[in-house]
Amino acid sequence: MRIVVLAGGIGGARFLRGLKAAQPEAEITVIGNTGDDIHLFGLKVCPDLDTVMYTLGGGIDEEKGWGRDDESFRVKEELAAYGVGPDWFGLGDRDVATHLVRTQMLGAGFPLSAVTEALCDRWRPGVRLLPMTDDRVETHVAIGEGGERRAIHFQEYWVRMRASVDAHAVVPVGAEQSVPAPGVLEAIAAADVILFPPSNPVVSVGTILAVPGIRDAVAAADAPVIGLSPIVGGAPVRGMADKVLAAVGVEATAAAVARHYGAKGRAAADDGPAGLLDGWLVDEVDAAAVADVEAAGIRCRAVPLMMTDLDATAAMARVALTLAGEVRA
Amino acid sequence: MRIVVLAGGIGGARFLRGLKAAQPEAEITVIGNTGDDIHLFGLKVCPDLDTVMYTLGGGIDEEKGWGRDDESFRVKEELAAYGVGPDWFGLGDRDVATHLVRTQMLGAGFPLSAVTEALCDRWRPGVRLLPMTDDRVETHVAIGEGGERRAIHFQEYWVRMRASVDAHAVVPVGAEQSVPAPGVLEAIAAADVILFPPSNPVVSVGTILAVPGIRDAVAAADAPVIGLSPIVGGAPVRGMADKVLAAVGVEATAAAVARHYGAKGRAAADDGPAGLLDGWLVDEVDAAAVADVEAAGIRCRAVPLMMTDLDATAAMARVALTLAGEVRA
């Protein structure tokens, strides 16, 4: 079975671990968000790609969910001693090596997709990990009121400010000019199932879909498209997705996110882009949303959606694949 | 008193510490060798400049004589895990931060002299540290016999091979096209004393002198030029200077090195470049060389030249300054 997953960072990576456990024989292609990439101290940092790579490759900090296991922060301390910022990004020593290899390869002319493949030669994540694009896309967030309105890098909003102020807009800068990385459209077209893990619908999955060609390819795919709600009981399971959902005018509810993606074969909103979902999983606490989602033309099931451990996560993946089978049948 | 010192790495840095102790009020300008600079993993590494900066700034690994104190090597271990080399260069985690700051500033367009000044803002070495040039100069060493003859980077010869094979030639690649960094020629012209610490006469002091304009400025300086022999009893005090001395046809003796620098006001050899030295210090064990050196037109004293501790090193510096005073008088 060929499965394509559009993944952000922590949520996407953890879901993928469950999916691999549920379907060890599947050929899984991960299309990773690169909109949260950032250049720090001259290094090209790809937090979401690395989170997937480390998580599936056994190198993740399990507790934090990002960064390397057994990490230290001596480089970061020394950079601070030089008075060189930013100081709010958790750049670990072991992690720095990844960024050095990446930055050096990019400087030598390799595209990010080739660099990612080279890094995965070490980590052997058991999936094919593709960046959504080889082009530079950087998600910026508009914050501030009146004359104080300004756009900042997503990482600054997310990590430094912890999304503590309202986001007025989320813009994947450069997305319009970007093209999907080699293999992305082919993988979507050849997929038996396409999954949206419980990643952030705006700054993770939404950014991937903003690369011209990807949304249309998903909408046109023969494969069933099944998503898992990152919103449980009206709040994000993890992270601060509600803040960026508000910026795009979407309520932080499981049903509203499904309607935001839209039903495959329909427009996602009046005059909106092509809808994407064949099926949607909400948590049991959101069982009341099932009818609402189905009314929008999307099959929906209420099942446990907390990725508390590998078994629970694998069960979620199995339900998603079962729903895909029902759609296909 | 304005003192100019042409310094390599460990020997130069330790001597400078003694000089500062001997003359705490002096304005010391250090012209640092950059011929051993190397690009590693996309980082610009300046071993000699950093050794001076760390040693005088209190950040050196005292035992090794290079690199940071309390150092760890996790970035290096991870780079090795990626299979990315070279693995023979001791790139420490704390050290990496220095190289990141430097590389980023160079990438932003600052010349190495400005970057060095910025790094010294943190370390406050108590001297003005100038790279010999802002241009790229890299010392290469010719090794191998017959068809195997090839040139390798000095660091590869020195660190990886530990100078275990003969060097046929030592070439500061790029030196001919380089110009002295801002302030270098002015410092030499304004100096009250110019010192050659017991640094490597070929790959440290020799490389500095290979930057067009610097040798002539030293030869033409009003200030007495006093050197300290890095060779004691026919062998280098530290390092493998004999290997690279052989490459330039100079015996590894205190007297031969003095003749190699040459006496100020004379040619350093038949039709050679302008001689440089007014005075030369040899170790007590080389007392027999004194007459030989003086016969070449260079004042010479035999004194203890082992930098065993700060007091011994300060005493060496004091003798050098005393000899400068005698020359001036």
Image: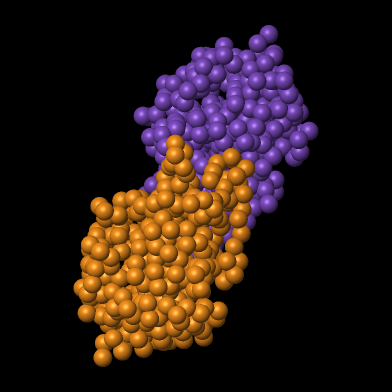
Chain colours: A orange, B purple
- Give residue B122's quadrant in the image: top right
Report if residue B26 is visible in the image: yes
* Image height of A70 relative to B307, above or below: below
Q: How far across and down, in percent of the image, does residue A138 sit?
A: 37, 52
Q: How far across and down, in percent of the image, does residue B173 sit?
A: 39, 37
Of the pair A269 and A182, the residue shown nearer to us: A269
Q: How far across and down, in percent of the image, does residue A212 sit?
A: 24, 60
Of the pair A306 and B252, the residue shown nearer to us: A306
Q: What is the tally of numbered marks visible in this picture?
A: 0
Residue in the picture at 44% in, 32% down: B110
* Image height of B21 relative to A74, above or below: above
Residue in the picture at 57% in, 71% down: A62
Q: How far across and down, in percent of the image, does residue A31 sit?
A: 34, 68
Name the quadrant of the N terminus of chain A: bottom left
Report if residue B167 is visible in the image: no
Q: Is residue B169 left or right of residue B245?
A: left
